[in-house]
Amino acid sequence: MTRISVTVDGVLYEEEVEPRLLLVHFLRDRLGKTGTPIGCDTTNCGACTVHLDGRSVKSCSVLAVQADGSQVLTIEGLASNGSLHPMQQAFHEEHALQCGYCTPGMILAAIDLVKDDPDPTDEAIRDGLEGNLCRCTGYCNIVRAVRRGAQEMAVTHD
Amino acid sequence: MTEVGTARKRKEDGRLITGRTQWTDNLQLPGMLHVAFLRSPMAHARISRVDVSGALGRPGVIAAFSGQDFAAEQGSLPCAWPVTEDIVIPDHPPMAFEEVRYVGEAVACVIATDRYKAADALEAIEIDYEPLEPVLDMEEALTDASPKVHAAGNKSFTWKFAQGDIDAAFADAPVVIDRTYIQQRLIPTAMEPRAVVAQTDGDMFTLHSATQIPHVLRVMLAVVTGIPEHKLRVIAPDVGGGFGSKLQVTAEEVLALLIARRLGKPVKWTESRSEGNLTVHHGRDQIQHIQLAATQDGVIKGLKVDLLADMGAYLMLVTPGIPLLGAFMYNGIYKMDALDFTCTGVFTTKMPTDAYRGAGRPEATYAIERAMDELAVEIGIDPLEARRRNWIRHEEFPYTTIAGLTYDSGNYEAATDKALALFGYDKLRVEQADRRERNDAVQLGIGISTYTEMCGLAPSRVLGSLRYGAGGWEHAQVRLLPTGKAEVITGTSPHGQGHETAWSQIAADALGVPFEDVTVIHGDTMTAPKGMDTYGSRSLVVGGVAVRKASERLVDKARQLAAHMMECSPDDLDFANGAFTVKGTETAKTIQEVAFAGFASHNLPDGAEYDLDASATIDPENFSYPHGTHLCAVEVDTETGFVKIRSYVAVDDVGHVINPLIVEGQVHGGIAQGIAQALYEEAVYDAEGNLLTTTMADYLLPSAADLPDFVTDRTETPATSNPLGVKGVGEAGTIASTPAVVNAIVDALRPRGVRDVQMPCTPERVWRALQ
Ligand code: FES
Ligand code: FES
């Protein structure tokens, strides 16, 4: 067992963990942060995407111990003061989700994408989200949502 | 009517975009244990010895069981669709104890205090197998020399259906198209893996499951496990996609209940993706031999279809019925004099197949739409013209097809014209000719799919005549609460389709209450006790109609009370915008006022009860027949075989639309799944019967980067078979798009002698076809 201290969605946790425990299981099973789902076991689907120190990572590809001393942001911590993040709002407006299973990862990956490319083309959005799979939407509305979210993020940050 | 037809943003989204979801795997119960299954590494073998004792001393391990431990109580997984009288339905034990018949079949399990410990201890289980020959090829399986999957042989059934004089249709037919198409095996791959939580207090059992069918599941589990139906509650919480794959009664659901009963503790099982690829039922997997007889002018006379359908190792819930759902669709939108359909269900040592988005109709549509292109080429006309010469004209509806179905409404001309305009058909044909002329390395192909499908499952009597075990009705209850808010209880079980939103729109209009004042309750057999669940694009056309009818009945009840309150006859009241108004006066009571008056009950008519809820059960009078025209342009690189979809236009007619946003989303997702079959996906077994595509790295779901933007539009020809005028939409895109894409690829390469490319049309396959 290893002792780690991780801040998740603004709350500091100090926990004993097995070295092999995946960050996503740490979030879900230990902290009850079930907003982050799991869709595969080969780091292909992106459903488990969170931000680790501000960058998006697939939390099934990171060990909990590797997150020691880090800041983790999950979908549950994204809305602030009761108002949705512009990307969350955009997914709602553009009907960019159906079952919603891919959605937390999609939103967090999209925010990271827009950080690097504040005004992405559709092609850049499609390429940038290649690691996040959705089985329901056919991606058209996800692309629209990310475009809209990017515009809104630009406005909010000005 | 203000809500219906409006692009309402979905009510469901709030929890889904903030992570406040209730996936089955989220559940944590006090004392809950975790189950891990040991699965057969052999496609076919006798189990000669299982020893689970080694697992028992492992850290955190509470129990371990083999199939033998459940043999007396586990029963057999059900098949509810014995399609013929003499069908072979083999015993299907949830946990194998004598013989294993596909890789992945559960043979033992460990129950431990956490999921890691349960998985760790599996390696301590000893199991000996005597290998048997796998059976992997359907045609070989039917030969006498083949090893047998089951003692009764490898044929499950042969089902025949014939209409008209097929011999006359083929006799002296100047044109006969004769083709064989392969529907590869697919893995449905809902993004949420299956998960089950079972618990009991010794009397009542509760099962949470990532299922599409909580109601059907409850009945079936009661039958299989012997737990009385009234002691079993099934809950489908938030469910992350299904596409037919969660329309099943699974081994893991049965075993979780049995384990919970045995240990007296709640137990959870969540599959890994690789476990899921092995053991979630697969889809498609048919060999289709289609023959089409036509005149020299391209007028179809008759159609013969001979299908081999891979059942896999066992018959699951509706396995044998899937090809039958296609049987009536091979004639598509076309008129003809005769149809002859034969399907043989074959056992192999692979994962059983069952419903996957479209279930039978995508296969049928693929075959007929491919054959229509061949017909056009054969007689030298444009493929659209071949369709026009044969399709049912709009003035001919209602039209009873050669398959005996009565298509209530449609307008193929209108949908096609709209699609052609959006697509720029003529311009693309010019470009195609130019590229051909120049012998460009990148060739352009245009694919057409003018589809219809039968959905909205289904009239119970028809299901009965096809030997399906249950009915096709749907139920709704609507309750008016004291403060005038409404609850809709539905028997449908959404897992992405937005029923909470769409049903709210239907009820809000009928009751005259705000959209926000409606809550939809579903997916729990205790709170939504009656239902037939969600599959076969049935929810709106059956369940949504039930919501409308129940709402109208509720308004009728409220009308009685309102009349009493205003001292008039119910007939003297108009009801509009949520208020009862005495005709020709200003005197009115809102439905909210009536709701509270009923609750207070101070002034009810003599002998009346407070009764402001109403139910309805709808048994549809017909199937629903959405249709449309999909056009796909592909660029095929003849040097690499790489296919790029350049543009995709879909004009669908799903009748009246409740929520255009949701409809568009369904169409998008459906198209993507159909394209995935055409270009990317295939479940591959090796020569020993091992599944090679167990991960998302091997089984290729398209990503955003693989797919184009889709141009979608609609025509609206209302269904006449239900009062909402609606048709199903959940499967239409998948049914339409696969042939559109493959027709486009073949169209691009036809001048180079290619007339078929087997799906998925990977660069390698396309390149080989060109050699
Ligand atoms: S669960 Fe992490 S990538 Fe699939
Ligand atoms: S919305 Fe269901 S997987 Fe993306």
Image (cartoon, coloured by chain):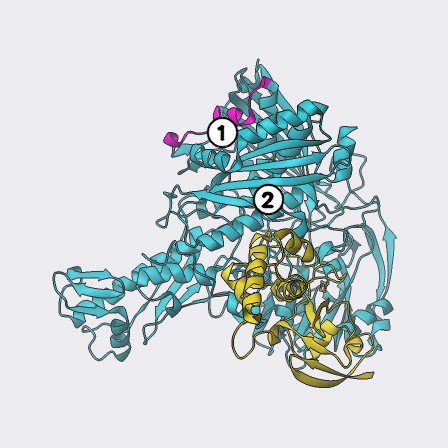
Chain colours: A yellow, B cyan
Q: Is residue B393 magenta?
A: yes
Q: 10 Å neighbourhood of mark 1: few (<14), some, or many (≥20)?
A: many
Mark seen at residue B322: 2
Q: Position of residue B647 (x, y in %)?
A: 59, 40
Q: Is residue A99 left or right of residue B564?
A: right
Q: Quadrant of residue A3?
A: bottom right
- Judge whether B66 appears above or below A30 on screen: above
Number of marks: 2
Residue drawn 85% across the image and 67% down it: B123
Same chain for marks 1 and 2? yes
User: Is residue B421 rendered to the left or right of residue B693?
Assistant: left
Q: Quadrant of ligand 1?
A: bottom right
Specify the amino acid type for callout 2: Ile
Magenta stretch, residue numbers:
B379-396
When asked about the image quadrant of residue B642, the answer is: top right
**Is the CB–ligand 2 distance for label 2 below 8 Å?**
no
Mark 1 highlights which residue?
A: B334
Pick the front one: B61 or B120 = B120
Q: What's the distance in space between the residues labelled 1 and 2, CA to CA?
A: 22 Å
Q: Amino acid at mark 1?
A: Tyr
Q: Nearer the viewer, residue A132 or B409?
A: A132
Report the quarter where the N terminus of chain A lies: bottom right
Label 2: which secondary element: helix
